[in-house]
Amino acid sequence: MATTTTPPRGGKHRPGGGTSPAAQTPQTKTKTKPKKKRGFFRRFWWVFFVVPLVGILALFGTLWFVYSHLTLPNPPAGPQTSVIYDRHGAVIARLHATVNRTEIPLDAMPASLKNAVIASEDKNFYHEGGISPIGIARAAFRDLISHHVVQGGSTITQQYVKLTYTGSERTIARKVKEALLAMKLDHALTKNQILEKYLNIVYFGNGAYGVQAAAQTYWHIPARKLTVPESATLSGLIPAPSTFEPVNHPEVARERRNTVLTLMAQQGYISAADAARYKAEPLKVSKSTSTAPAKDGYFVDYVTRQLLDKYRYDETFSGGLRVHTTLDATMQAAAEKAVADHLSNPKDPSAALVAIDPTTGAIRALVGGKNFNTAQFNLALQAHRQAGSAFKPFTFATAMEERINPHSLWHGPPEIVIPNPECYNNGQPWDVHSYADESAGTMDLVNALAGSVNTIFAQLVVQVGPAHVVDLANRMGIQSKLHPYCSITLGTQEVTPLDMADAYATFAARGMHHVPQGISEIKTASGATLQRPDFKGNQVMDQNDADLTTYAMEQVIAHGTGTSANIGRPAAGKTGTAQNWQDAWFCGFVPQLTTCVWVGYPKGEISMQNVEGYPNVLGGTIPAAIWHDFMSAAVSGMPVANFATPSFSGYDKTPGGVTPSPSPSSPSPSPSSP
């Protein structure tokens, strides 16, 4: 039986039987481990490095491109407070709308203020660029954990950029733009220039923008006079003006001030001992942050009206105008004192006073009431009141133009009826009474003016014509509307104190009229001249006619109705009292100064009786006393000057054409008083 042999697995069967030697000899094999696949990060780690790097480089490249092509815009011209100065350059008022701001140079700011701001706002201001990398990193971290912009991290340069260019929107884009502009600005300007611009625009509360307005608001002083504690107080306001406002929140403001003082000591600007001493001081801020003028208010009102006539509201109150005026502070103080001294009782009537340099028209003093803060109605400009007998000099001067002899004799009865139709009163002949119905007798025109004789001046106005009186009064400066009525000679028509002062100044200037000027020059904030008024005058009446009228008015003070106005030097003037004693005047002058005083109640048409010991207020009482006291003070430093001596030659006309007759039964108005 045959036997079959099966070769081992893996061996190869060879023909003829048997196996190969390889199959017959066992061999040992070495097993190889399969390769593990590498992880994604190990294979693409470079992506996590290169992509962010490329992104960062692209970002910085973009920022650099933007920065290199970024043009620093010109800062917008912010609103500035307009400033009004007196004739000697002292500030008397500041005009502003909602923004109170006045630019000043850095050297007009005290070192203590600059140090306080740097210590509290940006201690590395002078050592870093326009941005602070550390500050930005700190702000970015806080923004990141809050998921929105909450931290500023701004340098002073960035704060200025935010205030001037970018605004306060809390976005990343705005912060990037702010940083780029800050770097650009840091290369364009010096540190001191940036600090100056910043301190002139940053807000300090109560409408005050910039350190000058802030110092004036809280202490009524210029910034250069700020003390160290005051500087620290202002610096402390910058982060939150409403929170740290010192008038309404004094304790919080004091604590904040002391924090700034601590920072100043830590940074070496002041010693620790000085810081402790300053911390113990009270805030000492003004109780009132109002910028309304405490004095000179009526004059400021007059100037403001002139500005608004020429410039827009925003130009006047926000244009940074520098308005130099004609006001003399010493005379203004004397005017206010004279009014206050003679009308001290709150129930007393009010008063207005206007003083003008007759050689130029410059207004040296102006009082429009007893207290501007309680009554803004400017009686010197706005009160149209009857002038009474203070208007008689215009009739006298018209007679001089007509060459009527000033020494011609006239009869002054207690009452006179003028039958001329042009003088009719309500269809009836004009019935005129002298004061107290007393006869003045026969006298010349000079004495008739000195005694303020109504019945003589009624005859005179008929002789010269009321239209001619109106014409002369207008030429001399009366701006109020006048009508050619015969009663104009008795001052029954309404004029303002400024009108009367203007016209009387023309007498003082020997017939030369100068337009009243309260402004001598207007400049822009940068110093460019906008306006310089012309102080030249116009000869509106003959010099000798004016001199003769002045001569007659000298007699008023010498022995007439105005003796209480005698100031011991050559002076001329005229009293005036309207019917029922509702208006009382004294207008007069020396060659160098003209002053007109009106006394009455602001509401008008109220009789002034039993005032300051006077049964009735006449022009020769309180008005003359105010004029006397003011003029005595105002001209005390001026040399005594005489009026020109007039010539009486050529004035040879005598009155005629009027045949007056008494008529007690005719209706008559109340008499015009002296």
Image (cartoon, rainbow, N blue to C red):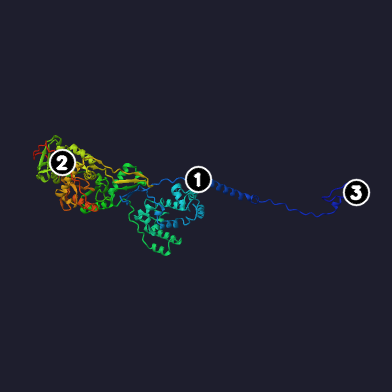
Point out the frontmost of discs 3 and 2.
Answer: 2
Q: Say which residue label 2 marks.
A: 649
Mark 2 vs mark 1: in front: 2
Give left or right: position of 352 versus 66.
left
Between 363 and 230, the one lying in front of the other is 363
Q: Amino acid at mark 3?
A: Ala
The answer, for residue 284, to whether it is visible in the render is yes
The spot of residue 587 in percent (x, y) is: 20, 47
Type of amino acid under label 2: Ser
Quarter occupied by residue 500: top left
Q: Which residue is mark 1?
A: 70
- Kind of residue at badge 1: Leu
Q: Secondary structure at mark 2?
A: loop
Q: According to the image, label 3 marks what residue?
A: 2
500 displayed left or right of 236: left
Rendered position, 307 above or below 128: above
2 lies left or right of 376: right
In this image, 89 relative to 672: left or right? right
* Residue 348 seen from this side: no
Nearer to us: label 3 or label 1: 1
